Amino acid sequence: MDIQVWLATIPPLAVYTLVTVVILIEMLGVPLPGEIVLLSAALLASQGHVDPVWVGICAIFGACVGDSLGYLIGRKGGRPLFGWLGEKFPRHFSPRNVALAERSFERWGAWAVFFGRFVALLRIFAGPLAGVLRMPYGKFLLADVPGGILWAGGTTAVVYYAGVVAQDWLSRFSWVGLTAAVVCGIAGVAVVRWRIARREKQEPLPELSPSPVAAEPAAVADR
């Protein structure tokens, strides 16, 4: 079966819904492949199967609304929320990862929310952690919304136009070529993650203050 024929059978509404829901849930703090879904949808748009404008709008909506909901959950749940998430998703919400995210907020304040969109670890931490540290919601929005627009809209635009340029090549993409590309991509990601994990094990994490709960909100709020 030709891959173009198969892609054409996917209803556009299903793509828009998937982009919105996956990215929104990821921003709540649940580790889902939101960026991969966005990249795939933008690539579909470059092939004419969905509208790139709607892909971008759905991604922006999911990112901004999801982060705001994550902020409210973090503000209400407090620090015990990360303990619960650590039990459910120990790989992503390990004590080390939580500490690294907190250090980023302590150092950069609201900028950690903005630039966190482009860092896989901070992307799922940004909303809930900002709520836990009681960053003022107005300041959070000023960093979160532009970051969401730049990340979701920018990613959609870049992948869409790159796909349009490569349309002739992609139209000749066989299942063999697709499989080879996926395998190479997965292998590349695995190698990068392995090197990052090895570096983290070699670099000891500096000790944090014994009672950061009371000090951190003030530090973040003042930035």
Image (cartoon, rainbow, N blue to C red):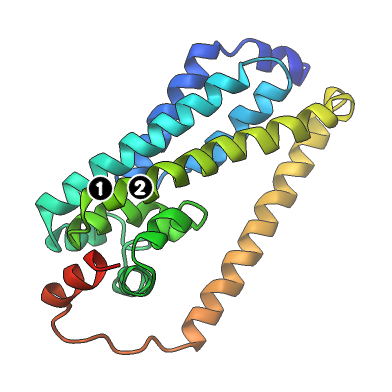
Which residue is painted at 12% across and 59% down in the image? 78
Task: Give the percent coordinates (x, y) of residue 82.
Answer: 21, 61
Position of residue 194 in the picture relative to residue 98 (left or right): right
Q: Is residue 19 above or below residue 191?
A: above
Q: Secondary structure at mark 1?
A: helix
Residue position marked by numbered label 1 in the rendering: 138
Figure quadrant of the C terminus: bottom left
Residue 39 occupies which quadrant of the picture? top right
- Identify the element where label 2 is drawn: helix
Asked whether, in this view, residue 110 is left or right of residue 177, the answer is: left
Residue type, label 1: Gly
Query: Spatial distance from mark 2 to mark 1, Cα to Cα?
Result: 6 Å
Q: Is residue 78 left or right of residue 87?
A: left
Residues tagged 2 and 1 counted as in contact (Cβ below 8 A): yes
Q: Which residue is mark 2?
A: 142
Residue at 31% x, 68% y is 98
Picture coordinates of residue 207 (x, y %)? 29, 89
Taking depth in this image into account, of 83 and 133 the one nearest to the observer is 133
**Is residue 193 something that shows in the picture?**
yes
Q: Quadrant of residue 89?
A: bottom left
Which labelled disc corresponds to residue 148? none
Relative to 146, residue 90 above or below: below
The local crowd at label 2, few if under 14, some if 14 to 19, many if 20 or more residues have their Cα within 10 Å, is: some
Crowd tier of the residue under label 1, counting other residues whose Cα lies within 10 Å: few below 14, some 14–19, many 20 or above? few
Relative horizontal placement of residue 42, taking residue 67 as reference (left or right): right
As shown in the figure, which amino acid type bears the numbered disc 2? Answer: Leu
Which residue is at a point 40% across and 62% down the rendered structure image?
A: 112
Up-down: is 198 above or below 64? below
Depth check, front residue: 22 or 123 = 123
Q: Position of residue 168 (x, y in %)?
A: 89, 24
Q: Position of residue 196 (x, y in %)?
A: 56, 72
Task: Determine if residue 174 is in view.
Answer: no
